[in-house]
Image (spheres, grey):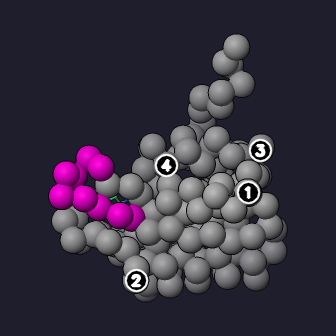
Amino acid sequence: MSGAIDRELEERARAAQALAYAPYSRFPVGAAVRMGGKTYEGVNVENASYPLTVCAERNAVAAAVRDGARRLEAVAVCSNASPPSTPCGGCRQVLLEFAADPAAVTVTAVNQQGERRSWTLAELIPHGFSGRELP
Ligand code: THU
């Protein structure tokens, strides 16, 4: 994966963050996933019934799946945290669902101040439940 493509994914996540619906937590998150060679964005969408909130990463994956994409290649997530915050455990599991090789999927966390941290998905969810165990 080239550095230029990584930066574009980060910019898409940063731009998406402005559209987050986060009136309760006041913690807007934007995510961008590259799946099947295309980029899809998502934002967190909160609800007055708090547990119904859906994270930015999961909404980005849903947009990709709706477009027919199935293979996850890279992820960028933008929050206001410093250092930039990582995808939650539930989102790691959802990302894993579409990762043919979790060690080859880069997850980059950024904020609007230009801080950046990155990992592979395998590092974020080691020994994850892939579904290959299912009958
Ligand atoms: N949130 C995300 O969108 N992605 C994450 O990976 C972590 C948390 C959202 C959920 C909620 O709207 C707010 O951040 C605070 O938890």
- Given residues 15 and 107, the one toward you in this image is 15
- Label 4: how many residues lie within 10 Å, few (<14), some (14-19) or many (20+)? some
Query: Mark 4 near ligand 1 (CB under 8 Å)?
Result: yes
3D distance between C-alphas at marks 2 and 4? 20 Å
- Label 2: how many residues lie within 10 Å, few (<14), some (14-19) or many (20+)? few
Rendered residue at 53%/76% (across/down):
13
Give amino acid for label 1.
Gly
Mark earlier in primary sequence (2, 4)? 2
Q: Is residue 71 visible?
A: yes
3D distance between C-alphas at marks 4 and 3? 17 Å
Give amino acid for label 3.
Asp
Write down the residue under mark 4.
Answer: 91
3D distance between C-alphas at marks 3 and 2? 31 Å
- Given residues 66 and 8, the one toward you in this image is 66
Q: Relative to residue 124, is residue 72 depicted above or below?
A: below
Rendered residue at 39%/64% (across/down):
44
Query: Helix, strand, or loop for circle 1?
Result: loop
